[in-house]
Amino acid sequence: MTQQSGWDFPQSPLPSYPPGWYADPWQQAPWRWWTGHTWSEIVSGGTPQGAGGSSAAGPPLAKKPFLPAWLSVPVVIAAIPVLLAVGYLVFAAPLAIALGLIPLLIVLPVLAWLDRVEPEPRAARIHAILWGATVAVVVSFIVNTIVALSAGELVASVLSAPLVEEAMKGLGILYAVRRKEVDGLMDGIVYAGWVALGFAVVEDFLYLSTADATGEIWQVFFVRVILTPFAHPLFTFWLGLAIGLAVSRNRSVFPYALWGYALAVATHMLWNGSLGLADVAGGGILLLAIVIFIALFVAVAITLAVIRTRFSRAFIASIPWLAQRYGVSETEVAVFSDWRGMLRFRRRLSKTDRKRFDAIHVALARLMLLHQRPGVVDPVQEGILADQLQEARYGS
């Protein structure tokens, strides 16, 4: 820890359990390797010698994931055509690529602000963006192209696009749920934003490059990038809200995801339909749609600010209880009990210490959310999160 921070991380005590093979608490494999501080990604389908303790040789079937956490098989497969298309546009329409990156500068700071209440792992954030930019884009492009060729561009825009695009973006959020990365309401909203942003950037590349060829690039840039950079995050917000709400209530995500999907599709259809009517009835329809969109954006922004404030207050209120239950030091309690002070303190840390600090913050926030869910707390899940907290506090 830097002297500027005025806080030293606690020194590591002896681990509660020695490194070795233990029954996988996630039940993704028969056995998972325990490092002495936390669960690793190394699993086994064999029968380890001395399971429940360490094994010198280890089982022959031990394996480590062949992809880093920020990738998945669907992303890798879908990335191939996307990279080829974007690579071509870099040379064929460089202005479209440059303008299409501007939404990142607008939307990313907002998502980072939302994510600060419970910082998500960088790998998880990257995967969410890549899912939107690859899997959601490729599947939507294929389906929308087929519908456009068979039923016309208007049907593809107003009917097919909202149905398919929101479904594929929703799968990106559900993938994060499957990876146990969504712990509550705010997580669902944040992952919806990351996935939608990835989709919107690549879609803007395609729209702007087409407009560049017809001489309308600045008109499209004004509508898509300047006026409505939050369009796709706003559509998918409803799915993230529904899925996050289901997780926070300890319910199955699918019934909740259905009404979230319905609202996401409805808002998407409303926007795309207004664009189609504007071509027929004139710019007045588009202006009205933009006003409605801005009003909806303001309403959602206020809702997010309220949710974020409530979360931060609940987090601060839970710190004394979490400290007593999980052995957090008085110094750590003092830091995490003042939200604004905590953020100021974090900014003074070095990059390495900030990463550790965020890990402690995340573990505490997830433990708080776990205990807030209705019903009996899952002792296995609590043990995993408690181990992650100790690993963050005592890790080197």
Image: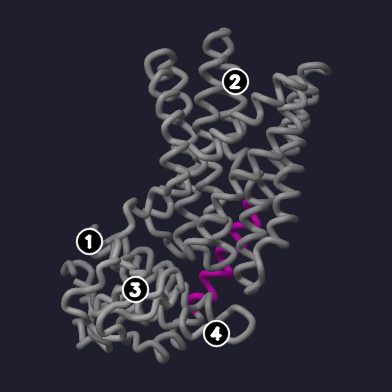
Task: Tell me the amino acid under the disc marked 3.
Answer: Arg
Q: In the rendered structure, does residue 256 fall within the stretch colored magenta?
A: no
Q: Identify residue for label 3.
A: 32
The answer to whether mark 2 and mark 3 are in CB contact below 8 A is: no
Q: Is residue 229 above or below residue 91?
A: below
Q: Position of residue 289 (x, y in %)?
A: 75, 32
Q: Nearer the viewer, mark 1 or mark 3?
A: 3
Which quadrant is the N terminus positioned in? bottom left
Task: Tell me the amino acid under the disc marked 2.
Answer: Val
Q: CA distance from mark 2 to mark 3?
A: 52 Å
Q: CA distance from mark 1 to mark 3?
A: 28 Å
Q: Identify residue for label 4.
A: 377
Q: Which residues are magenta?
A: 301-316
Which quadrant is the C terminus positioned in? bottom left
Q: For this view, does 37 lie left or right of residue 265?
A: left
Dominant secondary structure of the residues highlighted in magenta in the image = helix
Q: Callout 4: helix, strand or loop?
A: loop
Comparing 291 with 159, the one in front is: 159
The answer to whether mark 4 and mark 2 are in CB contact below 8 A is: no
| CA neighbours of label 2 inside 10 A, class few (<14), some (14 to 19), many (20+) | some
Q: Residue 352, labelled with which disc?
A: 1
Labels 4 and 2: the sequence-earlier one: 2
The answer to whether mark 1 and mark 4 are in CB contact below 8 A is: no
| CA neighbours of label 1 inside 10 A, class few (<14), some (14 to 19), many (20+) | few
Comparing 178 with 332, the one in front is: 178
Q: CA distance from mark 1 to mark 4?
A: 33 Å
Labels 2 and 3: the sequence-earlier one: 3
